[in-house]
């Protein structure tokens, strides 16, 4: 069966148009919703493979906020539907690490003629990339369980994505609770000292000395640690890895 795609669009005609095109291409559309709140709710209940998300939605929660929650809670990739290109909107959207954009015209409708082949290409690339990332995370997680150091891995924004069992033991945090949190919230020597891990790195401080970790239970634990940077092929920062031991 085809991949499940949740359509989040407050223009009914546009939503029906997209749904029809997706189903004709062999995808399944289990639901169409028009608000950010419903998008988060349906994503949790239906667990689609991908979400097509309109940025501007009616109600208190817009598409960017909804996408952020969906990515954080369920790790489901999001492709934005947008007619907006102002700097503030783009900056907010980038934080949620979207997998792509589908452009709408000034009326709010998807541009005509509707380039279904382009949409399907973006969807297939996104689904393939997400599967590869999940496979990579599973492999990395298995490797981390078998080393004698505590390891915490983050994305490019310093949000925790992986911890091994030793890191859970020393910090007192379970991965399910720590996932999506700032590294400094879990590894307290970094808490509130810097605006971001990027700022920490720019100051050329690598946390190689002994530091005191205050675990979730409030106990002080002396540890040795090393913060490493993970880079993409183009040398841009894609994440951080903290390695420490007692």
Image: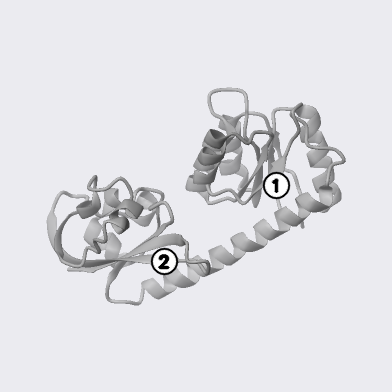
Which corner quadrant holds the N terminus? bottom right
Query: Where does label 1 land, which residue?
Result: 5
Instruction: Give the side of residue 206 with respect to residue 241, left or right.
Output: left
Give the residue drawn at x 42%, y 60%.
239
Q: In this view, does 209 lie to the left or right of 173?
A: left
Q: Residue at x 56, y 43 (%)?
A: 44
- Above or below, comparing residue 34 to residue 187 in the picture: above
Q: Name the residue under label 2.
A: 230
Label 2 neighbourhood size at 10 Å, few (<14), some (14-19), many (20+)? some
Residue 172: percent from the left, percent from the top?
24, 55
Is there CB contact under 8 Å for labels 2 and 1? no
> From the image, which quarter does the C terminus lie in?
bottom left
Percent across and percent down for residue 4 are 70, 50
Residue drawn 76% across and 34% down? 15
How far apart, in angstroms, are the residues tagged by discs 2 and 1? 31 Å
Residue 27 visible somewhere in the drawing = no
* Category of crowding for the residue at label 1, using alpha-carbon neighbours closer than 10 angstroms: few (below 14), some (14–19), many (at least 20): many
Q: Name the element at disc 2.
A: strand
Residue 134 in the image: state x and y as whole percent.
Answer: 54, 63
Looking at the image, the residue that sits furthest to the top is 59
Residue 141: image quadrant is bottom left
**Callout 1: SS:** strand
Q: Is residue 200 left or right of residue 40?
A: left
Residue at 66% x, 57% y: name it.
Answer: 126
Closer to the camera: disc 2 or disc 1? Answer: 2
Mark before the other along the chain sequence, 2 or 1: 1
State the image coordinates of residue 28 (x, y, percent, origin top left). Answer: 76, 48
216 or 97: nearer the eye?
A: 97
Q: Relative to 55, does residue 245 appear above or below in the rendering? A: below
């Amino acid at each position: 069966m085809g991949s499940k795609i949740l359509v989040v669009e407050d223009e009914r005609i546009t939503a029906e148009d997209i749904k029809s095109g997706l189903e004709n291409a062999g995808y399944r559309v289990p639901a169409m919703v028009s608000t950010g709140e419903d998008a988060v709710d349906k994503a949790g209940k239906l667990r689609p493979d991908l979400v097509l998300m309109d940025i501007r939605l009616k109600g208190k929660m817009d598409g960017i906020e909804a996408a952020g929650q969906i990515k954080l809670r369920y790790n489901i990739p999001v492709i934005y539907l947008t007619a907006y290109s102002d700097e503030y909107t783009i900056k907010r959207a980038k934080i949620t690490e979207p997998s792509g954009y589908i452009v709408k015209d000034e009326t709010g409708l998807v541009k005509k003629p509707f380039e279904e082949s382009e949409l399907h290409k973006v969807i297939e690339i996104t689904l393939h990339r997400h599967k590869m990332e999940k496979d990579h995370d599973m492999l990395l997680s298995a490797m981390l369980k078998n080393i004698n150091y505590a390891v915490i891995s983050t994305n490019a924004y310093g949000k925790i994505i992986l911890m091994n069992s030793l890191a859970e033991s020393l910090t007192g945090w379970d991965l399910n609770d720590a996932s999506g949190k700032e590294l400094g919230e879990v590894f307290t020597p970094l808490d509130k000292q810097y605006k971001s891990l990027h700022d920490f790195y720019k100051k050329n401080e690598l946390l190689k000395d002994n530091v005191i970790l205050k675990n979730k239970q409030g106990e002080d634990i002396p540890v040795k640690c090393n913060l490493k940077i993970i880079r993409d092929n183009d040398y841009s920062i894609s994440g951080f890895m903290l390695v420490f031991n007692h």
